[in-house]
Image (spheres, grey):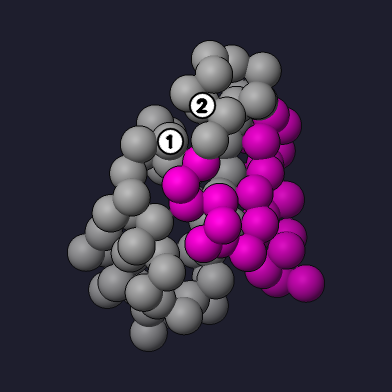
Amino acid sequence: MNFLQSCRNETDGIILNAGAYSHTSIALADAIAAIKTPVVEVHISNVLAREDFRKTSFIASKCIGSISGLGLKGYELALAYFIS
């Protein structure tokens, strides 16, 4: 969370794969909400096809977008969003 806040004046965007923290950390959601830097949430696997608890992301509503289930291509798509 400190890292996110330290990036706020250094980057134009953040690509974040928070793993299980996406589904468990309100503190991480608060950290994203506290910065103006846009964040794209990326998950390699399709979290909606996994366990029920993974279907809720505390950070999704704080991010400008979410990419899930496209493997490593999700990172490329997130980067393409920021450079377009």
- Residue visible at 56% across and 51% down in the picture: 60
Q: Quadrant of residue 4?
A: bottom left
Dot 2: within a 10 Å radius of its alpha carbon, few (fewer than 14), some, or many (20 or more) residues? some
| CA separation in Å, label 1 and label 2 | 6 Å
Would you place residue 67 above or below residue 23 in this image?
below
Res 3 quadrant in image: bottom left
State the residue at coordinates (67%, 68%). 82
| Residue type, label 2 | Arg
Residue 27 locus on image (x, y percent): 28, 54
Tell me residue 5's x, y (percent).
Answer: 29, 72
**Up-down: is 60 above or below 37?**
above
- Of labels 1 and 2, earlier in sequence is 1
Name the spot of residue 59 as percent of width and height, x first: 47, 51
Res. 54 mark? 2
Q: Is 35 included in the stretch rendered in magenta?
A: no
Residue 79, numbered label: none
Seen from the viewer's position, the closer of residues 68 and 61 is 61
Near-viewer residue (52 or 64): 52
- Residue at which label 1 appears: 23
Residue 27 vs 81, above or below: the answer is: above
On the picture, is 23 further left or further right than 50? left
Residues drawn in magenta: 57-84
Lateral position of residue 20 relative to residue 81, left or right: left
Residue kind at label 1, given as amino acid type: His
> CB of mark 1 within 8 Å of CB of mark 2?
yes
**Residue that protrudes farthest toward the right in the picture:** 84
Which part of the image, by quadrant, shows the N terminus?
A: bottom left
Label 2 SS: helix
Q: Residues within 10 Å of mark 1 (few under 14, many from 20)?
A: some
Left or right: residue 26 compared with residue 50: left
